Structures are given as structure tokens and as C-alpha cells.
Amino acid sequence: MTMWIWAGGCILFLLAMGYLADRIAVRRNIEFSPEDGIKNATDAEQIYVENYLNETKNTNNNIPL
């Protein structure tokens, strides 16, 4: 029983932190977009991420048995 209370408390804490971060971002007019992160990356980092995403796309659900 105490494990469920602890797990529920952790989940509620994470949800509360997300809500708090969202409220602060709205008040300060901060916009989060995934494209902003890749703009600041070097060419090598961009190539690495694009290769990783391409390999993930190509090998999705192709698990050898």
C-alpha cells in the first residue's frame, strides 16, 4: 500500500512541476519549439542526429528473431 502512495506522489509531483513550468512560460511569453534546438547545433551534430533518425526510421520493428 505504501508503495502505491509513494508512486502516486511521484507522479503528482512530476505533473505539478510540469504545470508550474508551463505557467511560468506563459507568463514570460516563452515559446518552446523543437526547431530552435537544432539551429544551435554544429554541422556534425546535425548530421549525427539526421543519421540516427534515418536509421531509426529504417529499422523500426525489424527485430531479428
Image (cartoon, rainbow, N blue to C red):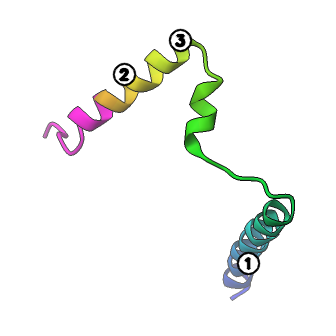
Q: Secondary structure at mark 3?
A: helix
* Place of residue 26 in the rendered image (x, y in percent of width and height, measured from the top left): 79, 65
Residue at the image point whose x is 75% and y is 66% from the top: 22
Q: Secondary structure at mark 1?
A: helix
Q: Nearer the viewer, mark 1 or mark 3?
A: 3
Tell me which numbered mark, 1 or 2, is placed earlier along the sequence. 1
Residue at the image point whose x is 44% and y is 16% from the top: 47
Residue stretch rendered in magenta on the structure? 55-65
Residue at the image point whose x is 53% and y is 11% from the top: 43
* Place of residue 64 in the rendered image (x, y in percent of width and height, measured from the top left): 15, 36
Residue furthest toward the bottom?
1
Hey, what amino acid is under mark 3?
A: Asp
The part of the image, by quadrant, that contains residue 28 is: bottom right
Hey, what amino acid is under mark 2?
A: Asn
Q: Which residue is mark 3?
A: 43
Q: Secondary structure at mark 2?
A: helix
Position above or below: 14 against 37: below
Tell me which numbered mark, 2 or 3, is placed earlier along the sequence. 3
Q: Which residue is mark 2?
A: 51
Q: Is residue 63 magenta?
A: yes
Tell me, for residue 54, which label it has, or none. Answer: none
Q: Which residue is mark 1?
A: 12
Position above or below: 63 against 47: below
Mark 2 in CB contact with mark 3 (< 8 angstroms): no
